[in-house]
Image (cartoon, rainbow, N blue to C red):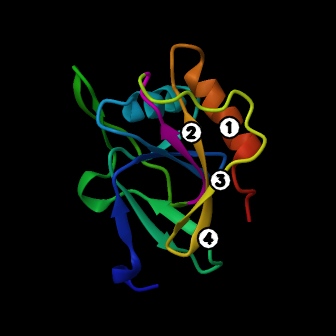
Amino acid sequence: MAEDDTTVIQASAVAISGRALLIEGAPGSGKSSLALALIERGARLIGDDGVSLSRGEDGALIAAPPPRIAGMIELRGVGIVRLETAPPAPVALILALRSPRDASPERLPESVPTRPLLGCEIPVLPFEPGPLAPAMRAEWALRLHGLAPR
């Protein structure tokens, strides 16, 4: 795939068991905090506030660290921290972070809508991080609603 077939989106991403979990939301919504909490539980950073996306040879959507900010994560009120990055991974799920003033996500979603990204349909789960085990809930969201590994 040619380099110009890659796009960079404003989101954070971590790799969990070889699958990429994209975390999107408005500035200050908790993308980096959720990514950091997942990293503390064993996930690996792909990108913070920027993720390179491209199509893999098998047709999967691949998330990779963006070159200019690879390995950097912003910890609000602390500074920029450098971490080892994960290798590129297929995108399995997008968590769309909600702020407390947004409508609450479904309590028990039976199905998850998808969004096309570079020709791939990716599940998108509205997600309110909140104070109750956000990293563990995000891991379960990936298990229950993420695309299966190829």
Q: Earlier in the sequence, mark 3 or mark 1?
A: 3
Q: Secondary structure at mark 2?
A: strand
* Residue contact between numbered discs 3 and 2, judged by CB atoms under 8 Å: no
Image depth: mark 3 or mark 1 in front: 3
Image depth: mark 2 or mark 1 in front: 2
Q: Earlier in the sequence, mark 4 or mark 2?
A: 4
Q: Earlier in the sequence, mark 3 or mark 2?
A: 3
Question: Which of the labelled discs sits on residue 60, or is there none?
Answer: 4
- Is residue 126 inside the magenta stretch? no
Q: Amino acid at mark 3?
A: Pro
Considering depth in this image, is 31 or 16 the residue closer to the camera?
31
Instruction: Tell me residue 38's x, y (percent).
Output: 53, 31
> Which segment is the magenta one?
90-100
Q: Secondary structure at mark 3?
A: loop
Q: Secondary structure at mark 1?
A: helix
- Furthest residue to the front? 103
Q: Amino acid at mark 1?
A: Ala
Q: Amino acid at mark 4?
A: Ala
